[in-house]
Image (cartoon, rainbow, N blue to C red):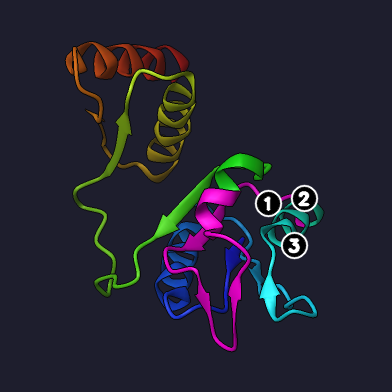
Amino acid sequence: MCVAGSRSARSAARVARFLSLHLDSELILAHPRAREDGRVSSERVVTAAVESEAELIVAPSSSHLRGGAWSEDLHHALERSAPCPVVVAPARLRQPWPLGGGLLCAVDGSDEALVAACVAGDLANRLGAPLTIADAAGGQPARHAARAQALVNALL
């Protein structure tokens, strides 16, 4: 599912189309309607994702809609409430999107980061792309990446 309506939605649509084609999945474009106050709630995106049984949400990095605004940063709200993984597409994306370098997943040792690594591993596997797990935390960063990589390897 791809969330449309913002200035960076074109990039999100490119990413969603690429993933849809390469994962042999249906692409659903969601353009949530604004509330009476002209703002759009992330709850409407979550509802659309649940109703469509989305496997993945591709959201724009920008939180500004044409003619309105999100009630909060969309990707931050979705990370708390989305029923499936969320990919945040950058506002300016090279066309065509190259996948030659594979996927990158940054981890910090948290349980949430381990889940993200597993999702990234599954996605990389399904795309036939290499996965790089990088450390995003201070301290003993090599330990976090090694733990995440071991978990991904065990699951795949």
For label 2, the SS is helix
Q: Quadrant of the N terminus?
A: bottom right
> Answer yes or no: do the residues labelled 1 and 3 have beta carbons within 8 Å?
no
Three-letter amino acid code of the residue under disc 2: Val
Three-letter amino acid code of the residue under disc 1: Ala
Q: Earlier in the sequence, mark 2 or mark 3?
A: 3
> Answer yes or no: do the residues labelled 2 and 1 have beta carbons within 8 Å?
yes
Between marks 2 and 3 in the image, the one whose residue lies nearer the viewer: 3
Q: Which mark, residue 50?
A: 2
60 to 148, vertically: above or below: below
Q: Position of residue 24 (x, y in %)?
A: 55, 55
Figure quadrant of residue 37: bottom right
Between marks 2 and 1 in the image, the one whose residue lies nearer the viewer: 2
129 to 21, vertically: above or below: above
Residue at the image point whose x is 42% and y is 26% from the top: 113
Q: How many marks?
A: 3
Instruction: Give the residue at mark 3.
Output: 44
Does residue 21 appear left or right of residue 26 in this picture?
left
The stretch drawn in magenta includes residue 80: no
Magenta range: 52-77
Residue at the image point whose x is 59% and y is 89% from the top: 67
Does residue 131 appear left or right of residue 30 in this picture?
left
Instruction: Give the residue at mark 1.
Output: 54
